[in-house]
Amino acid sequence: MAYNLLKGKKGIIFGALNEQSIAWKVAQRCVEEGAEIVLTNSPLALRMGELNKLAEECNAPVIPADVTSNEDVTNLFTKSMEHFGGGVDFVLHSIGMSLNVRKNIHYTENNYDFTHKGLDISALSFHRVLQVAMKMDAINEWGSVLALTYIAAQRVFPDYNDMADNKAYLESIARNFGYQYGVKKHVRINTVSQSPTRTTAGNGVKGFDGFVNYAEKMSPLGNADANQCADYCVTLFSDLTKMVTMQNLFHDGGFSYTGVTQAVIEQMEK
Ligand code: NAI
């Protein structure tokens, strides 16, 4: 069901890789709610070709950008502003990658070249996107910027590896840039801390099925799926949440505040 919550709004969506991607669902929901969007991903991801399908469905241009490149991010905002004839109202950062995770390197043995690369892609890129946007004055008054994160930023999930550190950094950027952009232009910046979700990035984490099942049992409402995450992001891009900024917002069916559930106790008693 659509409510026209984003009627007239324009946005940039980073990170839709395939139909499982959280960003894919967010893009679809934003358009359903009346927004016009630009889609972007790394040149490598675009070579896989799947994004064209979404672009057609959403009537959205695709502008490649590797988020580790200032030049690419600047080009993305320049082209987006040309396309829209002005600034944007919302931005979704839905990007994560760790080479230490991919190569199955234990946290205590992390390769720092890989750590740097992962930090650059997963966290610093958020600062880069905001810095470029601010310099170009590319985000309209009361615009809304979101990045996706995971509770491993606050609590230890050993197999999440260095992505836990990347997410802690990402959430800190949301607070600190949120202050600066709020004062300067009423732009609000938040992170959404999502339940484990079966996607390409999610499946890369060792023992991911265990993660998903444990979180399902530990959440009074069960795990939030990607479509529900998209619904939540729409509300945060809308004018109904104008005074929310610098927050890490849990979208996890109650997992973050649950000590234990009956389902887990029963499992332990078996
Ligand atoms: P996904 O694999 O579909 O999305 C990750 C995206 O990052 C891909 O589109 C990929 O092309 C993009 N990316 C990687 N390197 C890039 C670069 N250099 N430049 C531009 N884009 C680049 O997976 P998913 O799960 O949709 O991930 C989206 C976000 O949600 C990530 O931040 C992830 O950490 C976060 N998240 C995911 C959860 C899960 O369980 N799947 C749970 C909580 C948060």
Image (tube, rainbow, N blue to C red):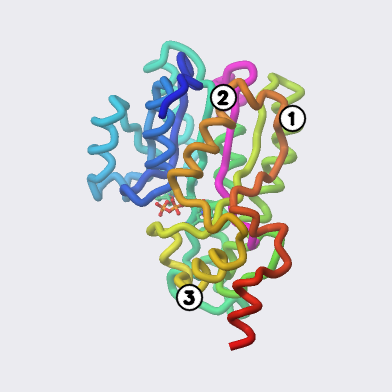
- Residue 159 image position (x, y, % from top left): 56, 74
Mark 3 residue element: loop
Mark 2 residue element: loop
Crowdedness near tag 2: few (<14), some (14–19) or many (≥20) residues, C-alpha within 10 Å: many
Residue underneath mark 2: 238
> Quadrant of the image for the C terminus?
bottom right
Question: Which residue is pictured at 58% across the width and 70% down the height?
Answer: 161
Classify mark 1 as within 8 Å of ligand 1 or not, answering yes or no.
Answer: no
- In the image, taking residue 50 as reference, residue 177 lies left or right, namely right
Give amino acid for label 1: Gln
Crowdedness near tag 3: few (<14), some (14–19) or many (≥20) residues, C-alpha within 10 Å: few
Residue underneath mark 1: 180
Quote the CA–CA distance across marks 2 and 1. Answer: 21 Å
User: Does 209 appear above or below 19?
Assistant: below
Q: Nearer the viewer, residue 241 or 124?
A: 241
- Residue 102 image position (x, y, % from top left): 44, 69
Q: Is residue 219 magenta?
A: no
Mark 1 residue element: helix
Question: Which residue is pictured at 65% across the width and 78% down the height?
Answer: 265
Q: Which residues are magenta?
A: 132-152
Question: Which residue is pictured at 58% across the width and 81% down the height?
Answer: 267
Residue 260 in view, yes or no = yes
Give amino acid for label 3: Gly
Question: Which residue is pictured at 37% across the width and 34% down the height?
Answer: 28
Dot 1 or dot 3: first in sequence order is 1
Residue 72 in view, yes or no = no
Classify mark 3 as within 8 Å of ligand 1 or not, answering yes or no.
Answer: no
> Quadrant of the image for the N terminus?
top left
User: Does 187 appear above or below 266?
Assistant: above
